[in-house]
Amino acid sequence: MTDREFENVCVIGLGYVGLPTAAVLASRGVLVLGVDIDDNTVALVNKGKVHIVEPDLDILVNGAVATGKLRAATKAEAADAFIIAVPTPFTDGHKPDLRYVEAAVRGLADVIKKGDLVIIESTCPVGTTDKACVWLSEARPDLSFPHTAGSAADVNVAHSPERVLPGKVLIELVRNDRVIGGVSPRCAERTAVLYRIAVDGKCLQTTARTAELVKLSENAYRDVNIAFANELSLVSDDLDINVWEAIQLANHHPRVNILSPGPGVGGHCIAVDPWFIVDSAPNSTPLITAARGVNDAKPKRIVSQILDAAAALDNPVVACLGLAYKANIDDLRESPAMDIAEALAKTGGLILNIVEPHIKDLPDRLAGFDDVRLCDLGQALGPANIVVLLTDHDAFGTVTLDDLGGKKVFDTRGIWR
Ligand code: SAJ
């Protein structure tokens, strides 16, 4: 036993945020229960194994389970604090879908008690943490919650958004500063005490509503800036200018830092979260809405350029390099590269040689087409007369422009600039 305020922590959702968070807390001596609705995930974690690709996570989880500090289950149990890290996707029409957050919060009703702390890490529309208090107070009228009782509440509730970058999760989890939004100041203070066990960065305290907007703003900021780069790539195409050279030169200005154009914006965060701001304030968000439009339109533009080039050839063979949404990961979710490959496959009239070094089989969306195959780099490039670079995996760094002589090249990431 130690004299720590938080001896037992329950982490709800063992995805790419929850599992690393659970493992890092366990490695710092906290007794952690990881909770997930997926039986396979729970079974795997209890064997000390992981279901996601993230550097060093397997070692950390293995060690935490071996020392008995981390275990997994499908239901929450009594603890001093609960951290909710479940997905918040959107529905058709770009409306936030809070069903997983609500289920996770309501799932705590049977186990919470006076003195507990509930933290939502999932990215949420402004007002969700207050709603969580209402959901809990409906289920537990015997306890008081901070939306009505303030700092005197029996149970404290806060929002502390995750900000970790896939591929660098374990480093960023510990080093990044954390924004901590309490429904009352006491909620924020207690949440900071918990995170200081694992976080070396600053723990910056604010209100829950501000913390919710801060997280959404970070991803919307990046989306708007990528949209600017993508729009410049369209302008450069129209004017026959090398966009990579133009951006590189513009970035020599001391106050200019333009991001990189690409095939579109993928992943489950940056292409999603800006819509949560738009949904809350539709009349005040023309810029954020326009940025989403620019980034979502980019894959279609690339498809039409490739199809124009293919139409000029007798037997078009297209080598598509990369399906993941960004470099050196295996995540195909919301990937513009997938959308482009699928659109080409559906159009037909061409052979599609896909290279994705991080997967073993073609994903379902591409598996049913006769003229689509997963190849290694050599097999794909040899017969190709069109080469499309969609993801800038390190594995493609060995290919030079000399290797591509005589082929029509679409380099959406600028690796052969
Ligand atoms: N991209 C570009 N050009 C760029 C940078 C990125 O086209 O210059 C594209 C990428 O290829 C990818 C997409 O944008 O398709 C998003 O990639 P990313 O690396 O910008 O971000 P994510 O989605 O992997 O992680 C983001 C991060 N947010 C910010 O950097 C503001 C991370 O810190 C968040 O924790 C994460 O979202 C999240 O979960 O919200």
Image: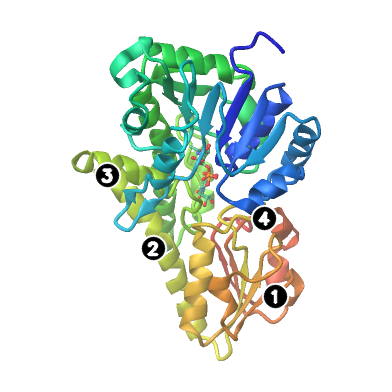
> Mark 1: which secondary structure?
helix
Q: Residues within 10 Å of mark 4 (few under 14, many from 20)?
A: many
> Mark 2: which secondary structure?
helix
Task: Between label 4 and label 2, give the one nearer the viewer.
Answer: 4
Mark 3 residue's CB less than 8 Å from ligand 1? no
What amino acid does circle 2 point to? Answer: Asp
- The numbered disc on residue 380 is 1
Give the side of residue 107 with respect to residue 175, left or right.
left
Mark nearer the N terminus (1 vs 2)? 2
**Which residue occupies 57% across, 18% down?**
194
- The numbered disc on residue 393 is 4
In 3D space, how far apart are the residues under numbered discs 4 and 3 (Cα atoms)?
34 Å
Q: What residue is disc 2 on? A: 238
Residue 160 visible to the viewer: no
In 3D space, how far apart are the residues under numbered discs 4 and 2 (Cα atoms)?
28 Å
Are the two marked residues, 4 and 3, in contact with CB atoms closer than 8 angstroms? no
Are the two marked residues, 3 and 2, in contact with CB atoms closer than 8 angstroms? no
Q: What residue is disc 3 on? A: 279
> Mark 4: which secondary structure?
loop
What amino acid does circle 1 point to? Answer: Ala
> Residue 298: x and y, percent?
42, 60
